Amino acid sequence: MYRYDEFDGLIVRERIADFRSQIDRRLSGELSEDEFKPLRLMNGLYLQLHAYMLRVAIPYGTLSSKQLHKLAHVARTYDKGYGHLTTRQNIQFNWPALTDVAAILDDLAEVEMHAIQTSGNCIRNVTSDQYAGAARDEIEDPRVWCEVIRQWSTFHPEFSFLPRKFKIAVTAAKEDRAAIAVHDIGLRLIEREGLVGFQVLVGGGMGRTPYLGQEVRDFLPKEELLAYLEAILRVYNQFGRRDNKYKARIKILVNEIGVDTFRQKVEREYEDGDRETVNLPTEEVERIRAYFASPDFEALNDQSSELSNALATNTQFAAWVRNNTVAHKMPGYVIANISLKAPGEAPGDITDTQMEVAADLASHYSFDEIRVTHEQNLCLPHVKKDDLFAVWQVLHEAGLAADNIGLVSDIIACPGLDYCALANTRSIPIAQQIAQRFSDPRRAAAIGELKIKISGCINACGHHHVGHVGILGVDKKGEEFYQILLGGSAANDASLGSITGRALSSDETVDAIERLLEFYLAERQSDEPFLSFYRRVGAAPLKEVIYASVEA
Amino acid sequence: MPVLKRELNGWQLISEETIADEPASVSVSSIDLSTDKLPARISVPNDVDVLEALEPLRERLGEIHQIVLTFPAFTDGRAYSQAFLLRQRFGFTGDIRASGNVLRDQALFMARSGFSSLEFEKAPEGFVSSLAAYSAYYQRGADGTLPVWTDRHSDALGSKRRAA
């Protein structure tokens, strides 16, 4: 993984000194809250319902064990002993004191971490495929380009006060695990006639007006990436709407002027722009690429007798392997997901002790690497099959062996009204109730792959628009109600879900989802996944089931 | 209002007399191209497409001493792109003045986008330290600041690009 050189370290340290001065001026009253707000936001510091919240960047979701140990230390020392993993592969601490923030940043800087641009109207932490460098279906490691973007976007003088926040995702795999279609810019590395380049999507996003990204370039030579991103950002910075916060994302610009006009503007800017000094020279790309070289994998047999024996004797372990592991590009290795969705727990929350356990596993069994997924789980990218049972035993002991990756209880949920000042409703309790309702593993296995995504308000931080089943919290005269959406997807077949009808109470919602899934189990054709089932039968019969036995 | 200006020896506060002597600026939309002499100071509102608005003046930009760009609110960053385009696309070498809601925590972004003078409300001490808060950058600035990769690769290619 990437390691800082003297310059990266210097920039982060200078940033802390800069931010420390800003905090001091806020505390002394020299800066008004209005003036301080955009500054603290550019450093990931939000004022939430009960306290400040600090969002720490985990660039493209990759962590070393040392970094995860440090996050555990922050959770223990400055917070209430836990952190919350986000859909941008970052971690949030919900209870830091403003006076501790600079000290936290000092601690993080020791392990090459920061909170730069995790919020604010700037280019946010770039996200990627959590299986990067381990997946069988990728063209090259997308994190090389993520790091190129991270550096280019850090304190970009021209693009730090954009009309609105700006999110970029990169994938290099056939299967999109980075949800690129719902990003301001989605980048997919593809191969064409022996060359590698990017397909460039622009204008995807969720929030109150969801759109899927549209193709602006079918193939961009990869060495031209930064010049092309500059062109897109320059068009957006000048012409994106600033009169209305809710119409300020690039998706609105693209759709108001049309993708063809938008493309013309971008292409002209790209042609005329200063490409030579914006694009990195090959030497610099190769310098960065060297950090993402494959670890020293052993030459192994793909069959592991240790694994076979354990699978044969331990059914709990076998279920975990079935649901939580994914094929690795190297024989004898697997990708092992650690679910943070144990039924009854808040999705994405992790305690300091669990962080320490996961960090130790990464250092012993996964070449010191661990990943945060946009679905709010962790992932050990390179585990030997021979070691898998030992890994599981440690996870089991630590309460981290939930075997539900991709299943009904692996729910994305925003923090909701439990923490967030913007929320209309809580999200976490609905996620917990659904997970508990479907805690029977046989039932969950029968239902199979299902993405439930819950947002506590229309800002859609819980990605409800792209859930196979989406749940949106709405406030009705001070009471919490929930709308159900069906048919969304953030994968290759990206689509936006449709609202089924009027909002339900929380109890009604959980009951309605149970009826919906029972109906699916009864009516599906052989092992048809839920999303295919929905696309085949359409919304009408499912609406009927959702609203059956609900008082009109 | 005080003005900090980039001089050869760094950012300097310019005198009140100098400011008082500055001619009034003329909005780019009301410039009469048929006259022999363009105004010395022009202003470009921040919702104007500079590429379009200044194209008719391209050959005569040398006559203009200063272009004033505006930040109606410090959160409105359109003028950063305008300044970049003036420096890079038009090769404008005169003064680019930041006016409006100019605060010290945005001053360095302005300087790196090509602004060479800043008109502000508060005392200048903080500005000067904020303008010097960083000693390395990831991007090439419109003020000539070089990206860190030129230091990382001090080989022939690096120096060629440095000279460019």
Image: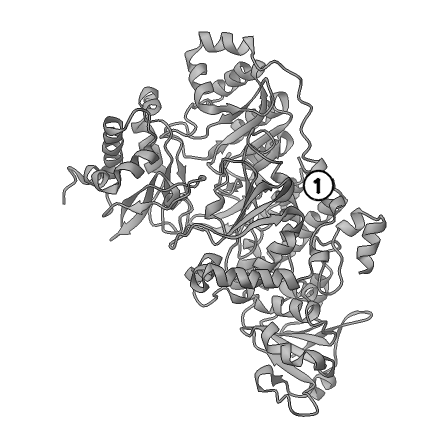
Residue A104, quarter of picture: top right
Report whether B160 appears left or right of A44. Answer: right
* Image coords of residue A255 (percent x, y): 43, 60
Residue B134, quarter of picture: bottom right
Q: Residue furthest right?
A: B156
* Image coords of residue B25 (percent x, y): 63, 85
Between A189 and A16, the one nearer to me in the picture:
A189
What is the crowding at mark 1: few (fewer than 14 residues within 10 Å), some, or many (at least 20)? some
Q: Which residue is mark 1?
A: A288
Give the vertical position of B151 relative to A246 (above or below): above
Q: Residue at x 29, y 51 (%)?
A: A475
Q: Residue furthest bottom?
A: B35
Marks counted in the figure total 1
* Quarter of the image where the N terminus of chain A is located: top right
- Residue B124 showing in the rendered view: no
Secondary-structure class at tag 1? helix
Between B162 and A405, the one nearer to me in the picture:
B162
- Residue B104 showing in the rendered view: yes
* Image coords of residue A96 (percent x, y): 53, 44
Between A439 and A28, the one nearer to me in the picture:
A439
* Quarter of the image where the C terminus of chain A is located: top left
* Image coords of residue A315 (percent x, y): 41, 12
Which chain is disc 1 placed on?
A: A
Give the vertical position of A499 relative to A325 (above or below): below
Give the vertical position of A130 relative to A393 (above or below): below
Give the vertical position of A82 relative to B76 (above or below): above
Q: What kind of residue is marked 1?
A: Ile
